[in-house]
Amino acid sequence: MPRLKLVAELVGHEDRVWQVSWDAAGTRLASCSSDKSARIWGPIAQSQFFTGEIAEAEAAMEVDIDTSDRDEHRSTSDTWQCLETIDNAHKRTVRSVAFEPTQGRVLATASFDGTTAIWERGPNDETYDCVATLEGHENEAKSVAWSASGQLLATCGRDKSVWIWESNGEGDFDCISVLMEHTQDVKMVLWHPSEEVLVSFSYDNTIRIWRDEDDDWYSAATLTGHTSTVWGGAFSHNGKYLASVSDDRTVRVWTWGATPDENSDANAGLYYRPGISYECVATVPDSVHTRAIYSVSWGIPLKNAASSGDSSSSDDLGYLATGCGDNTLRIFKVTADGSLDVTLICTQENAHGLSDINCVEWNPMHPGWLATCGDDGAVRIWYLEE
């Protein structure tokens, strides 16, 4: 029976931790907090931590932490360290953090002060300098995300808007679009893993898909089905499926839409845009989670490790992890053999003590390694053992 092993607890933030984000290499982890700071963490052995003898030894030790009460017993791993604390830019909560995906030296943070800061690490040290501050949101910025190319950055906020920024290099960014179709707070933005297509998740219970045509960004589809706030989502590693989570306690999995024959409506007019079809193909019912689901992450199959060269079955779509207001961390196995199947295989109660789990994030390069954070102010590293 699969189970999660708690390998390390990273302590340093002085208030709840909202989000964690791995860099593209999977060797650094960023976190952000209500204490107005972001922190950069890394294993002392860098990438070797996740492979070979170091990983086996660390996973075998399994940190002994009493997750029922954060104040009575707390531990940290002697194989992880805080590389940098960024606390000199934002005046309020840092709500979101994201590494630029192509280099790993650039970081974005979005804050309740309405700004998004861009940070760049020097070539010879761990110091991150603020190279740009993006302003425009009327109030709280809730999420920031980079496109796969690193050329586009999206932000969203309480002002119901989604902003798209283009990087010109050297810390120079231009706002190329402001999207106002949502009717309530926008909770999260997410880029497709290979296409320059944006997804936004909102308090208005909907998910919107945004596409670009001749430098004009438009809402290509609105996904409905959730009956309460949609907190966020995650793509499968192959980009063919999108998972979403909600205050309604359900997880929905959608097929990523395909454009119909472009000639099918050739006379539809100058402003015709071909329709894109999306379909909900699986739902984890509200009986599985007992409170709002705040975060979901879609991890690659365990046999898909780049270091081993193994290839997983095309039916194996990896693992979904969910973070929830019921203090429980859940892992689902996802397979596609004719129809999509989402099966609960592992639960970890009180994963952050009696606190909400605000974010879950699978390592993008090292299968089975999962980072979480919560209202207890801690960041935790887990290993999924089959």
Image: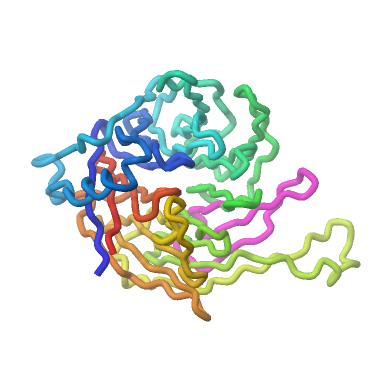
Rendered-image quadrant of the C terminus: bottom left
Q: Is residue 182 visible?
A: no
What residue is shown at x 57% (from left), y 68% (from top)?
A: 255
State left or right for residue 51 relative to residue 218: left
Q: Main secondary structure of the magenta part?
A: strand
Please say whether residue 326 is one of the residues in the magenta stretch. no
Tell me where the magenta segment starts and ends, as one range. Answer: 200-229
Q: Is residue 306 above or below residue 303?
A: above
What residue is shown at x 46% (from left), y 54% (from top)?
A: 232
Q: Quadrant of residue 223?
A: bottom right
x then y, percent, for residue 247: 39, 60
What residue is shown at x 69% (from left), y 58% (from top)?
A: 220
Please say whether residue 217 is one of the residues in the magenta stretch. yes
Q: Nearer the viewer, residue 375 or 41?
A: 41
Q: How is the image coloured?
A: rainbow
x then y, percent, for residue 155: 55, 40
Q: Quadrant of residue 289?
A: bottom left
Q: Nearer the viewer, residue 129 or 315?
A: 315
x then y, percent, for residue 14: 25, 31
